[in-house]
Image (cartoon, helix red, strand yellow):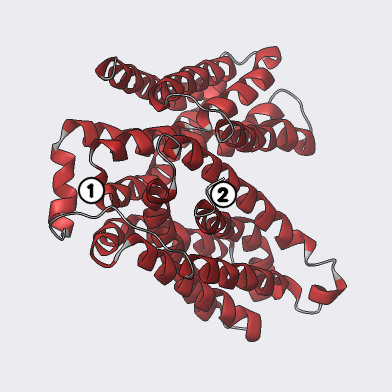
Amino acid sequence: MNFKTIPIFLAFLVMGVADAMGPMADAVKDNYELSNVMATLITFFVFIAFAVFSVPGGVLAARIGKKNLLLLGLGFNIAAMAVPTFTNPGYFVLLTCIFLLGIGTTFLQVAGNPIMRDVSLEGNYSRNLALAQGIKGVGSSGSSYLVGLVLILPVFSAMGWRGVFPIFLVLMILAFIFVALLKIEETKADIPPSIGSSLGLLKEPAFALAVLGIFLYVGAEVSMARFLKPTLESFGFTADKAALLGPTFFLGSLTVGRLIAGSVNINAHTFFRISAALGAIGVFLVLTGAEALTIPGVVLSGLGFANIWPMLFSITIEEKPERSSELSGLMVMAISGGALVPLLMSKFYDSGMGAFSYIVPLVCFVYLLIISMKKAKKTA
């Protein structure tokens, strides 16, 4: 085992903390007596940080080094977790902390994905990146679970909804220490990049197609997680059962698929094509509107969605590893697809199209299947 990957895996684990802000929104709403719109700003401020700071983060990583950007991101996250750990902040101070967490997590994503290549043994990058995404999924699920668990643990219950922050703070500090001790030789660009040169990479079709692919993939994933529960409820399932068989099965399949991918050795191009095909088939089964096909479709789509990010990301980085930081910034910026694509599906769903509204994520995955075949032919 290459022990240099351990600090990077730990960094991926703590990336999942940002995903816990969604489940925390209800507790924050009750504590501050907020409207739903004001409470939703918790997740908005995390999301907007990805859109604003990804490309600058990629430029910064290329100039100061990916390890240093990881440490900077972890430093932001430590500060963000420390304030609600030691004080009971006002709501707008809390929002500032959440925004800082969003910036820090953006930097972790921008630096963490390409630095995995620098610490991986030859031929293991795609597999390690898939495993890292699985570990991030464990961090997301675990962090979200902790939000509710701390309310019943005596040692933390006295802090109420803030009880989870000390745990997050300790994890961030441990990750910072492990990354700081890491000795690594990074792949660097010959010429220091700028935001203009980073955006200029989009002029190359291979990179523009990949960034669009990430945009559509994230949008499709968020759309599935958002609408599976109401879809199953329309079949007559109770809310609890619909949540279990819909988004829980889907997200669980995502995590399982990523952990499996991290334990097998398969060509990234081949795995990308298999994943895209599996995802498209799964979404199509859900789109049929047949109850008997929907649950298998949920599981198949989750397994297919699981490894689009690590495979497409690693394939793209291998095109120009010396520009990995800038490419990472562009692809992390494309996470904004998670805000925009679901809006289109919402329009379809609200218009009464029901299961046929899954045509939106299906089209996204047809696109991914097309570019996966093109890339596979290129290396044939």
| Residue for badge 2 | 136
**Amino acid at pointer 1:** Glu
Give yes or no for contact between labels 1 and 2 (Cβ–Cβ under 8 Å): no
Does dot 1 land on a helix, a strand or a loop? helix
Measure the C-alpha gap from mark 1 to mark 2.
25 Å
- Residue 4: x and y, percent? 50, 55
173 or 215: which is nearer to us? 173
Q: Quadrant of the C terminus?
A: top left
**Label 1 neighbour load within 10 Å: few <14, some 14-19, many 20+:** some
Lateral position of residue 305 relative to residue 244, left or right: left
- Residue extending farthest to the bottom is 87
Q: Relative to 326, does residue 39 appear above or below in the rendering? A: below
Lateral position of residue 153 relative to residue 205, left or right: right
- Residue 89: x and y, percent? 59, 83
- Residue 164: x and y, percent? 69, 69
Does the image show residue 219?
no
Q: Relative to 282, does residue 215 appear above or below in the rendering? A: below
Please give the name of the residue rendered at 47% of the width and 19% of the height, measured from the top-left corner. 274
Q: Quadrant of residue 235?
A: top right
Q: Relative to 322, does residue 104 appear above or below in the rendering? A: below
Does the image show residue 298?
yes
Query: What label sits on residue 322 in the rendered view?
Result: 1
**Amino acid at pointer 2:** Lys
Q: In which quarter of the image is the N terminus?
A: top right
